Image (cartoon, rainbow, N blue to C red):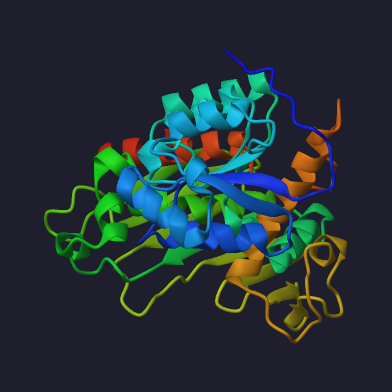
Amino acid sequence: MVSGRQVESGKGPIRLGMVGGGQGAFIGGVHRIAARMDGEFELVAGALSSDPARAKASAAELGLDPERSYGSFAEMAKAEAKRPDGIEAVSIVTPNNMHYPPAKAFLEAGIHVICDKPLTSTLADAKKLAALVKKTGKIFVLTHNYTGYPMVRQAREMVQKGVLGDIRVVQAEYPQDWLTEKVEDTGAKQAVWRTDPKQSGAGGAVGDIGTHAYNLARFVTGLELDTLAADLTSFVKGRPLDDNVSVLLRFKSRAKGMLWASQVAPGNENGLKLRVYGTKGGLEWTQADPNYLWYTPFGEPKRLITRGGAGAGAAAGRVTRIPPGHPEGYLEGFANIYAEAARAIRAARKKGGKVPKDVIFPTVEDGVEGVAFIEACVKSSGKNGAWTKL
């Protein structure tokens, strides 16, 4: 049953809770930094671990009120919904299989949700969550954080304005090397859950980083995928999930694409890159140099557009923090997603308030598509790379 809980309007920080992200968790710390960078959120409650003792210790390290350190997300959702000063939003930073249960609980409690990707570990759960978001009317933000980079917004704006003409070719890649050996056997937390189908879902590298590359390509180009042909491989002996994926993409516009994601490519750290080519020119962006966007009009020399510099447009400008030449990176891009979430939540504080049109963040619908992408890749690969509908 959907809660009728009301949150008072006001100009103070948005009261935030967190599920997961306790001791030893990388992404929880990233979310906390991103949430507080602009002073828009205040972390006031948490169910920071499935282990109550670790949850309590983690809360103490973060200075949370012991009374608002919970042993489970269910307890937290119920208690916070009853408080007059209860949380307005929750960040879910758990392994994939534990996205759906807490997201459902907090939405039903009348609390906005900010969730790590992929949305869920199954498409069925993803669709149920999307239906619940629609029913409750709550804000749901999926942290595909790379869409927060200013020069990614610049690339998107250029495509939308037709600077590249009709898009013909899209190439996205995300290589890493950290799973080249069977790191999960050492007990490394980040490797253990990512290579476990029970926690990660049907996809390994395709779910963990392939979805980021796919979402980035979709965000910048706006192209809708029609069919794909995928080859998923587990190169490391005994690893049940893929650690390398190659995908051919056919878009509804007749544009073609290629996507490669790997966690067994020595010499690569987080090598996310996107290239887009149209009838009038091409763009290239790489996360290693996120403040630079290369633009090549057909038949002319390659040009460099810099964050905050000449040629950068309004879309990049509204998420640019500091003057050009001072680098902005991963944490700032992540914080831009939280800043957009804050704008949406503040609008929702007002009765009948609508999210401003210029506020952009990955939605629950993007999350459903991401899980559908994973399942289509797994299905295609299982059929020897047969072309498969999304």
Residue 253 image-quadrant placement: top right
Q: Is residue 150 above or below residue 206?
A: below
Residue 290: percent from left, percent from top: 63, 74
Residue 216: percent from left, percent from top: 59, 55
Residue at far top of view: 1
Residue 346 image-quadrant placement: top right
Quadrant for the N terminus, please: top right
Residue 344: percent from left, percent from top: 77, 42
Residue 345: percent from left, percent from top: 75, 40
Residue 228 image-quadrant placement: top left
Q: Nearer the viewer, residue 383 or 348?
A: 348
- Residue 241 showing in the rendered view: yes
* Left or right placement of residue 29 versus residue 185 in this view: right
Q: Nearer the viewer, residue 384 or 117?
A: 117
* Left or right placement of residue 254 versus residue 271 in this view: right
Callout count: 0
Residue at far left of view: 238
Residue sitting at 82 percent across and 76 percent down?
A: 308
Q: Nearer the viewer, residue 335 or 215?
A: 335
Q: Nearer the viewer, residue 324 or 374?
A: 324
Residue at far bottom of view: 325
Residue sitting at 84 percent across and 55 percent down?
A: 161
* Left or right placement of residue 51 versus residue 207 in this view: left
- Residue 165 showing in the rendered view: no
